[in-house]
Amino acid sequence: MKKIKVENIINLIMFLYILTLYIFTYQEGLNLISNIIGVLFMGLVWIKKIYKGEKIVLNGLSIFYLLFIVICLFSSLYAINASTSFVKSRTLFALLILMVSFINYIDTGDKLYKLMAYFAYSGLITSLYIIFSSDFSDLIRFGSDLGNVNAIGMILAISSTFSFYFILERKAYRFIAILLINSATTFLTGSRKSLVFLVFTLLVLAWSKTDRKSFIVSRIKSLVIGLIILAIIFYATFKIPIFYQIIGKRMENLFDYLSGEGTSEGSINMRVFMTQLGWGWFKERPFFGYGINNYRFLLGQTIGWATYAHNNLIELLVGIGIFGTAVYYILQLYLIRDLYKVSKVVSKTLAYTFMSMILAYVFMSAGLIYYDSKHFCIILAVSSIIAKLYKEKEIYFDNNKGKKR
């Protein structure tokens, strides 16, 4: 009888954990299932590491994120609601343990590509669930039974990005169907942020396919691929009736607002108002803020409705001030710098995949909260080890296959 390898068990648990991040994380009560599987994954990783006597890896990301947590924890000493700040700091510390677990487990190219594929497959399973459980006679935003539709749209867009990587770089054409299904379901969630994220990451990946030996020709090919992507997404958004009703009209409202014409859409106007309030509160306490996750209490005192800022930058500025916010964004710039360095000496696509996702989140700080996102923390963790894997010759990219050397 063939012996079951410990790593195969850990890989299975890792897949189940990523899958539950998609289908359980945003459902109250069911997120406990995801947390239990996550603890199981981390426990197995550390048991294996300790048993084999392997060195624990703590990189720059770990140090920056720990400093960010310390600042958040310190803010609970003067917060409007100290308990809320303390609980959020505790959550962030749990995320740090999760990140360090991934940093220590993903030590080969094979594990890296498995992780990326697990995201793609999890998105596919989630998309199929949404499609087959939705009522197409009622054209409202799909996916609400899984939780916040904007959050669902974002994680499906992440799956689409990884799928596009496998198509472009590894010629795994089975991911074409996964890309199409995940992207279509992203449209059905009606999430504008997800659509922007998808467009941005796909265009960056298309642009990354440059052959240094035929620079001009490859640039023209990348440009053509990018134009095709834009044409397909534009047509789907504004010309296919079901997509237009769900996402197209919402995009038109956004364009109207950005053009200066203004819009009657309540969600846009409300979020602009919340951002303006937050900016005013930040200016009153620019250095230390009011305590992490305490924006909601200021808002509640002002309008009688307590919720988060829907703006990552404002949420952090109000919560922990300019220094804590700077630390959080510097850790992302630190990763982008390392990924860019890797892209200069090897094929760009893998490095650009993670770089594009981090940049997309940074650019969309004005429209979402992500500093406590499990999905994004995993992306950060994996991004932080790509340079290390390349230096240790665990992966290489110049043959466009990404196999272990």
Image: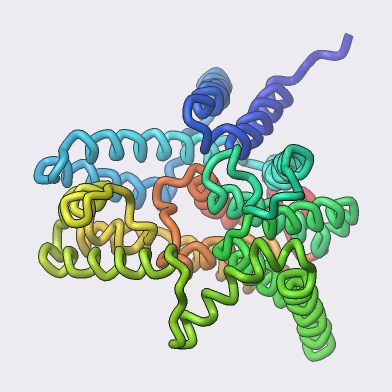
The residue sitting at the bottom extreme is 216
- By what rule are the colours in the image chosen? rainbow
Front-most of residues 217 and 241: 241
Image x and y of residue 337, in percent: 49, 68
Who's the residue at 47% across and 69% down the image? 265
Q: Is residue 241 left or right of residue 96?
A: right
> Residue 168 sits in which quadrant?
bottom right
- Judge whether residue 212 can be spotted in this image: no
Q: How many marks?
A: 0
Front-most of residues 262 and 16: 262
The residue sitting at the front extreme is 137
Q: Is residue 37 left or right of residue 167?
A: left
Who's the residue at 29% across and 50% down the image? 68
Front-most of residues 318 and 174: 318
For residue 331, above or below residue 118: below
Image x and y of residue 253, in percent: 54, 75
Image x and y of residue 353, in percent: 65, 62
